[in-house]
Amino acid sequence: MKLALLGVFAISSLALSAAVFSSAASGVPPENASPIYGVTIPDGYRDWRFIAPAQEAPPLDELPAVLGNDIAVEAYKKGTLPFPDGSILVKLAYKREQSTEFAPATVPGASTTVQVMVKDSKKYPDSHGWGFGRFVNDKPVDAAQHETCLSCHVGNVKDHDFVFTRYAP
Amino acid sequence: MKLALLGVFAISSLALSAAVFSSAASGVPPENASPIYGVTIPDGYRDWRFIAPAQEAPPLDELPAVLGNDIAVEAYKKGTLPFPDGSILVKLAYKREQSTEFAPATVPGASTTVQVMVKDSKKYPDSHGWGFGRFVNDKPVDAAQHETCLSCHVGNVKDHDFVFTRYAP
């Protein structure tokens, strides 16, 4: 009986892995996928449309900007909430750097992180439909850091489908 | 003799107006075109690709971001300098606003200005090929403000084809 149950659990786990991670054939998350969520950096995201800039105070001391794929941008423009499945948001963050050419300006220095939110309500039922990925130099950071994503988004922006960024006019 | 010269000057001025301003038929700049340069806000610019964010210290106290049309973005990616004719850059600037949802973050408030640079070496031979437009609430600001564009760009970024913004990675 115990063995039979274990068997069912193992099969479910495999099925879940196949759904969450794109390397479905092996059931093993690719090296470049985030822990917990299996999110990868989407191809071509740097050419996606612009949603909004921001600024993060020290110690982060960053200039971020959020881009979105077409599904996400159209949802923003129409005010569609929750975001539809297929929406992807990418936050590009840069170290703040004093401009050497124009004294009042701070400009982007080195890239610090790329952060991704993917909406897929079937794949991510336990995180309000969102999968998270945080990448440094194109590599995902560890599980501990990924565990902080959801609680911060749930704690602060549950009324905006767990998304901080608003569309800048 | 004087009259004849005046006549030539008047014709040249008209020809210049027709070249600079898009309403070529009348030779009169449209109401929504910038003084000096006759630059208008380009259609669809809000969907253009993202070049870089920035931050401007007080008293401006703004969060700007620069978008570019395809010609400009491809030039940035290839490192093409000077920018080819047809390049258009648009800077969207927003008042810096403290986020009410995440203490370390500053987010975009109201739009302050939209600023446009258009590369057309035939149309703008006296300003290194660039035409400038600065708009508040979609209306161009006055000539005095437009007179400051060129000198600041020439004084600070002549080695980057008079463009401040670099492509953020």
Image (cartoon, coloured by chain):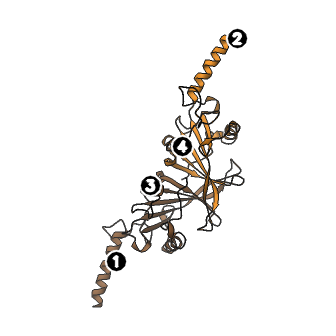
Chain colours: A orange, B brown
Looking at the picture, which amino acid does disc 1 mark?
Ser
Q: Chain of mark 1?
A: B
Q: Measure how far apart labels 4 and 3 are at the Cα level.
A: 31 Å
Q: Which residue is mark 1?
A: B13
Looking at the picture, which amino acid does disc 2 mark?
Lys
Q: Chain of mark 4?
A: A
Residue at 36 percent of width and 65 percent of height: B22
Label 3 crowd bin: few (<14), some (14–19), many (20+), radius 10 Å: some
Q: Secondary structure at mark 3?
A: helix
Percent from the top left, x then y, of residue B3? 28, 88
* Residue mark closest to the camera, 4 vs 1: 1
Q: Measure how far apart labels 1 and 2 are at the Cα level.
A: 93 Å
Label 4 crowd bin: few (<14), some (14–19), many (20+), radius 10 Å: few
> Does label 3 lie on the same chain as label 1?
yes
**Which badge, 1 or 3, is on the more N-terminal residue?**
1
Query: Is A166 located above or below residue A4 in the figure?
Result: below
Q: Who is closer to the viewer here, A64 or B159?
A: B159
Place residue A122 in its image quadrant.
top right
Q: Which residue is mark 3?
A: B74
Q: Who is closer to the viewer here, A162 or B74?
A: B74
Q: Which residue is mark 2?
A: A2
Percent from the top left, x then y, of residue A158? 65, 39
Label 2 crowd bin: few (<14), some (14–19), many (20+), radius 10 Å: few
Q: Chain of mark 2?
A: A
Q: Chain of mark 3?
A: B
Q: Measure how far apart labels 1 and 3 are at the Cα level.
A: 35 Å
